[in-house]
Amino acid sequence: MTELPKPAQFDAEYLRRLKEGDPETQKHFGEYFGFLLQVKLAKGVRSWQMLLDVRQETLLRVLEAVRAGDINQPASLGAFVCSTSNHVLWEYRRMDDRGLRELSAGAPEPIDERMEIERQVIDRDRKRVVESVLRQLPPTDGRVLRMLLIEERGKDEVCRELGIAPDYLRVVLHRAKARFRNRIGLRRRKAASV
Amino acid sequence: MNHLEAVGRQAAEKYLLDELSPEEQLEFEEHFFGCAECAAEVEAGAVFVANARAVLSEEAGRHAPVHRWWMEWRRPAWAFAILAALLFLVAYQELLRIPRLRREMASLATPRAYPAFVLRPVARGDDQVLQVPSSASLVGLSLDVPPGAAYRSFECQLLGSTPLSIAVPAPASPGAPLNVLIPVAQLQPGGHTLVLRGQTGNSKAVELGRFRFIVQLN
């Protein structure tokens, strides 16, 4: 689950193919929503394993609902996936809380698995693009990203230290992300045309 | 939340920077799961952040100063500890050790008398008793060298728990006694044995005699 596949037209035809078990459509469904769920769940789970479980359970439940004909509006498929994941996450959190309570008070804290989650989307090509994007950023922007991502400084602290407005953080991320997206898009188009 | 609202509020950036309230977050998630454009924005941001974190971490690792154990002393906590230890050492040297050494040097430069004894070889009878004044710091011992071969040098070895060995050059005139000075601290009250060895050339030293004596401090 390292990349968001091309978006599809979530219409009656897509829903029909999904309901009938078309392998291509099922693959697209799993990859597209699997990636979005990964991004979403990374903010709410305690471990990489929990993320995998919740993602899997969500996709299964949505597929069951599609097969049972419970989705009447094809355009709302995305919203349905999202709300299903909220329910599943809530259930898993409850189970997890119960499990944690049953553990002794001295049990170790769950480890920070952010790196494991992020590792799924890190690769050499992307790093190379990121390196060139970072090189071309104004020095302040590079410093902002370094302070936020590596030094893990609070946003208020970063703004205070660099004398910038809080909105500027979003501008930095937006600019860097836009350049990254353009270059990645360019590479994909080049690769497709070869 | 519709697409225009999401774009106008920079929702994708806020989402990635955790700047949305829980309600806004749910709203935006529901939106981008159904909006291909916003989903692509979120994807690009998440992928960029993950890869940028990896790149910047590697750079930070490359530029971090190499840690060497012997540079630990430069850290403030170690520097204070080392400074304190040095101050203690200087104070110890200045207040105790150096004055004592000065006193010892001064006493060596001052003329003074010391008790001296002529030792008898063991064969000549009972252990010899040496009455040493407790105030003395050195004791002179004089030993007769048995007649015979000409020795280039001698060695006097005081046996005991902490053996003491003294190299003695041959006296200027043949047959003259050997004289050695021994610190009283090395002569605990009680019995002692001193072994005299002679060295003729490159051969092994030859034992010339043993001197047994009893030290009594008074």
Image (cartoon, coloured by chain):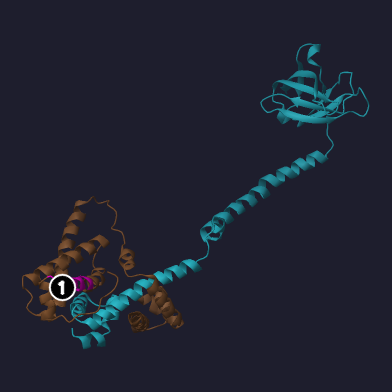
State left or right for residue B197 relative to residue A51: right
- Chain holding disc 1: A
Do we see residue B183 in this rendering?
Answer: no
The span picked out in magenta is A21-31
Type of amino acid at the residue the image marks with label 1: Val
State the residue position of label 1.
A81
Residue B39 percent across, percent down from the top left? 24, 79
Give the left or right position of residue B106, taking residue A110 as reference.
Answer: right
Q: Residue B29, percent across and down?
A: 20, 76
Q: Position of residue B183 (x, y in %)?
A: 75, 31
In the depicted structure, whether residue B179 falls above or below residue B106: above
Q: Colour of chain A?
A: brown
Report the residue at 58% width, 52% height from top.
B85
Which of the 4 quarters of the picture holds residue B73? bottom right
Chain that appears cyan: B
Assess whether residue B131 is covered by the magenta stretch: no
Residue drawn at (14%, 78%) of the image:
A14
- The front one of B210 and B10 is B10
| Residue A52 seen anywhere in this rendered image of the structure | yes
Q: Is residue B91 above or below residue B187?
A: below
Q: Secondary structure at mark 1?
A: helix
The quarter of the picture where the N terminus of chain A appears is bottom left
Residue nearer the viewer, A120 or B137: A120
Q: Position of residue B65 (x, y in %)?
A: 52, 65
With respect to residue B155, does B102 lie above or below? below
Locate residue A150: give its quadrant: bottom left
